[in-house]
Image: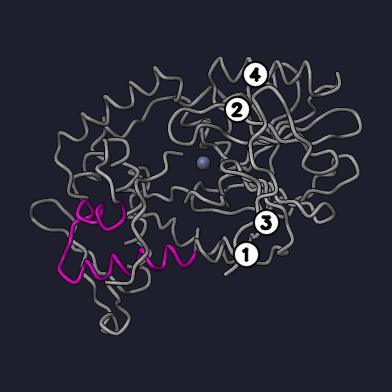
Amino acid sequence: MSELQYPFDDHPAPGTTIEVAPGVRWLTMPMGGSLTHINLYVLEDRDGWWVVDTGLGDSTTRDWWHEIFANELMGRPVKGVICTHMHPDHIGQSKMITEEFRCPLYMTRAEYYQARTFSMGFGRHQSSWLGEEFYVRAGMPRSYLEDLAKMWSQRSSEGMSMPEMPSGYHRLEDGDVLTIGDHDWRIVVGSGHSPEHACLYCAALKLMISGDQILPIITSNVSVHPTEPNANPLKVWMESHDKFLDTPDDTFVLPAHNLPFFGIRQRLRELISHHEDRMLAVEEHCVEPAIAKDLLPVLFARELDPRQTMMALGEAIAHVHLLMHRNRIERSLHEDGHYRFTSIDPDLARRAHPDAHDAPDERPILV
Ligand SMILES: [Zn+2]
């Protein structure tokens, strides 16, 4: 299998931009944790710029944006802000930029309303019976809810909570075309990592701005949460990968994390086979009935803190839900309040290869 190609060795320094194609400039904003940064893009129109994703809602990011406005946009205004999806590193400065330039925010409907709901701050799972039931069914002790509450209050003090959103937006839908400068950008919607994630594809420039939908190295988090305990996000994630396989192979992919790359179809095939492999490992483990918590070492190599555990449980449950949909795993609720998952496919013994799996990921990626 050929390797992915990375034409750039390094990210632009904060406050600067690099032109990656005519009228398309790449910049980064800092992030804490192992990711260290997010990639953002600005697109040149005849009378101003479009911003794609905005960074975290902290003062450092805001100050870097003012450097960009002053030095990198040739004195012209921002005309529109496009956010690929509702996670805090993508929407953090959407209100600041749209206020500063009195320009609209563009998002898909599900992403915009989910962002607005979450930014209002109430309805946290740790204070509801829904949250308690979800984590107890996954095999966690009731005290885990207290660990989560502590983690959330620390995170908001670190500027990682959901920012306030602009009070209105322009809706993006799958297949919409935005004409920016000389080029048409088509909206391609994927799902699974977030409900209605918008990517931007320009056939003339052979570019795809992929957000967190397609990343070259890290595997985006695909999780079930207490908000929708029977959701099947991995099913739509896999379907989205099939859909994106139609993208021409010479497309230059501009992701939100890691470096821009060539090799979109290879990367999609790697991700599909990675999740298939993880699901098979889960099936092999569930020959003996197992709770979700017991699946964490099957999927992740490291000891996990409370937040990583939350993300990891969400991912483990996403994998079993797709297996349940495929009739390969059965779920039953036991007297101790835990769900147990049992493999039921008679063909599993033939498919199983317990000694030939991918190595588990170190830990879930916290975006
Ligand atoms: Zn994300």
Q: Earlier in the sequence, mark 2 or mark 3?
A: 2
Q: Earlier in the sequence, mark 4 or mark 3?
A: 4
Disc 3 is placed on an element classified as: strand
Mark 2 CB in 8 Å range of ligand 1? Answer: no
Q: Earlier in the sequence, mark 2 or mark 4?
A: 2
359 or 54, nearer to the observer: 359
Residue 110 in the figure: left or right of residue 328: right
Identify the residue under disc 3. 262
Tell me the CA gap for discs 1 and 3. Answer: 9 Å
| Residue in view at x 27 percent, y 72 percent | 354
Disc 2 is placed on an element classified as: strand
Image spot of residue 355 (x, y percent): 28, 72
**CB contact under 8 Å: marks 2 and 4:** yes
Image spot of residue 24 (x, y percent): 79, 39
Q: Amino acid at mark 4?
A: Trp
Identify the residue under disc 1. 265
**CB contact under 8 Å: marks 1 and 3:** no
Tell me the CA gap for discs 2 and 3. Answer: 22 Å
The scheme the figure's colours follow is one colour
Quarter of the image for residue 259 reads top right
Quarter of the image for residue 206 reads bottom right
| Residue in view at x 51 percent, y 46 percent | 194
Q: Amino acid at mark 1?
A: Arg
Q: Is residue 24 above or below residue 222?
A: above
Q: Residues within 10 Å of mark 1 (few under 14, many from 20)?
A: many
Identify the residue under disc 2. 29
Mark 1 CB in 8 Å range of ligand 1? Answer: no
Which one is closest to the eye, mark 1 or mark 3?
3
Residue 112 in the figure: left or right of residue 155: right
Identify the residue under disc 4. 64
The magenta-colored residue range is 272-300
